[in-house]
Image: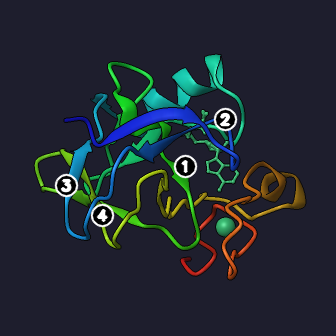
Amino acid sequence: MRRVTVRKSSVHGRGVFALRAIPVGQRIFEYRGEVTSWRQASARHRRSGRPGHTFIFGLADGRVIDGSVGGNGARWLNHSCRPNCEAVEDGRARVFIETIRNVKAGDELFIAYGLTVGEAITPELAADYVCRCGAKRCTGSMLDLTSG
Ligand SMILES: C[S@@+](CC[C@H](N)C(=O)[O-])C[C@H]1O[C@@H](n2cnc3c(N)ncnc32)[C@H](O)[C@@H]1O
Ligand SMILES: [Zn+2]
């Protein structure tokens, strides 16, 4: 029985929603896509993507999974400053999305993107990453402002 579906989100565009209650600690699905270099994925994104809108998932070894090529429903996961899921990397360039809280039927599933940019955060750049998750303690940004 399917546990999640993709539909319109009040946070942004499409999101992933639970079709039934899912307890904490459950693996939902793999974040699928092409494993490639950061350079190649960002060049592809510059050609066809919008600034601040990406399906690129960073791996610990510096490569990325580009969900825009061969990706699955996981690429529609939105960011929240109080997520109910996390991404777990298995060390062999595979990433799995797992619940870190009990999820109710109808809840949207979120991860914390933990995005970093290798440059100074100008107002223009910050505007590309404004967070609309609606959490009580929303930081206002999808960027991980604690790192760097
Ligand atoms: C991987 S996509 C997620 C799917 C997206 N909702 C869509 O329909 O394409 C990531 C993009 O969704 C948007 N997004 C995700 N979470 C957001 C949030 N909390 N606030 C504002 N935009 C968000 C941003 O544009 C981000 O770059
Ligand atoms: Zn937020």
Return the mark for residue 27. Answer: 3
Is the residue indicated by label 1 positioned so its CB lies within 8 Å of ligand 1?
Answer: yes
Return the mark for residue 13. Answer: 2
Instruction: Name which quarter of the figure residue 147 lies in.
Output: bottom right
* Residue at 70% over, 29% down: 50
For the residues labelled 1 and 2, say whether their Cβ atoms are less than 8 Å apart.
Answer: yes
For the residues labelled 3 and 1, say whether their Cβ atoms are less than 8 Å apart.
Answer: no
Q: In this view, does 45 lie above or below 19?
A: above
Return the mark for residue 40. Answer: none
Q: Earlier in the sequence, mark 3 or mark 2?
A: 2
Q: Identify the residue under disc 4.
A: 99
Question: Mark 2: which secondary structure?
Answer: loop
Query: How far, Cα to Cα, is label 4 from label 3?
Result: 7 Å
Query: Which quadrant of the rendered structure holds the C terminus?
Result: bottom right
Q: Identify the residue under disc 1.
A: 78
Query: How far, Cα to Cα, is label 4 from label 1?
Result: 14 Å
Q: Earlier in the sequence, mark 1 or mark 2?
A: 2
